[in-house]
């Protein structure tokens, strides 16, 4: 089968790989119909996440047709068109039973934090992902969800990560009616977090980035204020303080993570020399610009090693910090309803369609922010 193949930082290609096989009675094999390149994939592509191994196939956002199931699979059947949450979750462990599907204790037994994730670093289990013609899906009685009749698969594929992650970012922020919410990062997740903040009663939503095309997209899609931290202000923290009567924002969402720009020291130590698990510039801004007693919600991805974080400011300001990988399965019923009712329109985020055989060009374009790319969708010869 044709699949994306990681060859080292900034080096990917499409190549022939062996077909996946059933390895456990609860496995399913899915013929992929749609897959996406995520901003989190770029952290792998750029070499910012430890233990990303040569030969890996990325892709944690995909949907497809069930082609084969193990003998214990009862929830899906051959021929079902399913969306596959990026969390690999057993559904039975202590954490899954709490709805913490992103922290499954069985799917990534070598780790004490994150559960298994499709197509990510070996710190997340080392599972191959969905940027391939076929994918093995473990725990097929738990994750794969049949796409409701009438739902556009372009909407469905974004329910595997972008929509639930943006929604959970707003949920974790603890937004109260009338709150001012600031989102750092106008990538797809940040844009979705800004859009979903209104659903929780926000009175004002501000998004900050450095790419004008992303900010313009955010204004139109999320109906929010959007500012360029390189052009519209000298210091994002001071800017936010001034625009909130020097109180600070009620809630701040870090939707950037390891590759944040804006501070030379953070960039050098976190992105160039890899002395910390990514640049924490956006997290610094979040902690310093939120009000005393406010909430910082983190969905931007950082590596699992140390970071330089102003924890003293967290203590002295009395902040609440909430962070996690989105628990997609927990959120899906509500989000499917929102999509079907037109409250959220995920497919409007898709700006580019890239054939799998051109995946290297897709990564280069998305990473370099070329051609006003917001969200690239990988398409397949067998797509329906």
Image (tube, helix red, strand yellow):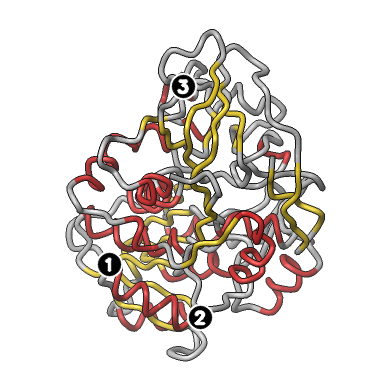
Of the 4 image quadrants, the one containing the N terminus is top right
Residue 37 lies left or right of residue 253; in this view the side is right
Q: Quadrant of residue 46?
A: bottom right
Residue beneath disc 2: 210
Image position of 330 (left or right of 131): left
Q: Which mark is residue 78?
A: 3
Could you tell me if the residues under marks 2 and 3 are in contact, i.e. CB atoms within 8 Å?
Answer: no
- Residue 180 is labelled as 1
**How far from the left and from the top, in percent, is residue 308?**
67, 61
Q: Residue at x 66, y 56 (%)?
A: 357
Frontmost residue, 270 versus 355: 355
Q: For the residues marked 2 and 1, what is the alpha-carbon distance in whole angstroms? A: 21 Å
Please identify, in this view, whether the residue under mark 2 or under mark 1 is nearer the observer. Answer: 2
> Which circle's residue, 2 or 1, is located before the other in the chain?
1
Q: CA distance from mark 2 to mark 3?
A: 46 Å
SS of the residue under disc 3 = loop
Q: Is residue 353 left or right of 225 when viewed as pictured?
A: right
Residue 293 visible in the current orientation: no
Asked which secondary structure carries label 1, the reply is: strand
Mark 3 residue crowding within 10 angstroms, few (<14) / some (14–19) / many (20+): few
């Amino acid at each position: 089968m044709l699949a994306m193949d990681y060859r080292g930082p900034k080096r990917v290609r499409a190549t022939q790989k062996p077909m996946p096989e059933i390895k456990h009675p609860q496995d399913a094999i899915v013929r992929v119909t749609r897959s996406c390149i995520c901003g989190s994939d770029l952290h792998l592509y750029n070499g910012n996440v430890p233990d990303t191994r040569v030969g890996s196939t990325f892709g944690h956002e995909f949907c497809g047709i069930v082609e084969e199931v193990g003998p214990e699979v009862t929830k899906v059947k051959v021929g079902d068109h399913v969306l596959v949450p990026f969390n690999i979750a057993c559904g039975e462990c202590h954490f899954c039973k709490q709805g913490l599907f992103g922290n499954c204790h069985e799917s990534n037994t070598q780790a004490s934090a994150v559960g298994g994730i499709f197509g990510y670093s070996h710190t997340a289990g080392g599972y191959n992902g969905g940027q391939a013609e076929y994918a093995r899906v473990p725990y097929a009685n738990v994750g794969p969800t049949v796409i409701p009749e009438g739902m556009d698969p372009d909407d469905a594929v974004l329910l595997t990560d972008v929509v639930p992650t943006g929604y959970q970012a707003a949920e974790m922020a603890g937004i109260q009616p009338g709150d001012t919410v600031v989102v750092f990062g106008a990538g797809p997740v940040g844009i979705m977090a800004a859009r979903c903040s209104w659903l929780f009663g926000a009175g004002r939503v501000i998004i900050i980035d450095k790419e004008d095309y992303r900010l313009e997209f955010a204004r139109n899609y999320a109906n929010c204020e959007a500012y360029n931290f390189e052009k519209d202000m000298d210091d994002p923290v001071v800017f936010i303080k001034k625009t909130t009567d020097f109180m600070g924002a009620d809630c701040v969402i870090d939707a950037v993570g390891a590759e944040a720009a804006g501070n030379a020291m953070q960039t050098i130590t976190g992105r160039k020399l890899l002395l910390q698990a990514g640049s924490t510039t956006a997290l610094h801004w979040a902690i310093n610009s939120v009000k005393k007693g406010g909430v910082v919600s983190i969905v931007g991805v950082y590596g699992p090693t140390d970071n330089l974080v102003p924890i003293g400011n967290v203590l002295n300001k009395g902040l609440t910090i909430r962070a996690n990988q989105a628990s997609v399965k927990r959120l899906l019923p509500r989000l499917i309803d929102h999509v079907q009712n037109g409250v959220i329109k995920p497919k409007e985020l898709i700006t580019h369609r890239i054939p799998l055989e051109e995946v290297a060009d897709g990564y280069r374009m998305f990473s370099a922010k070329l051609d006003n790319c917001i969200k690239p969708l990988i398409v397949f010869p067998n797509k329906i």
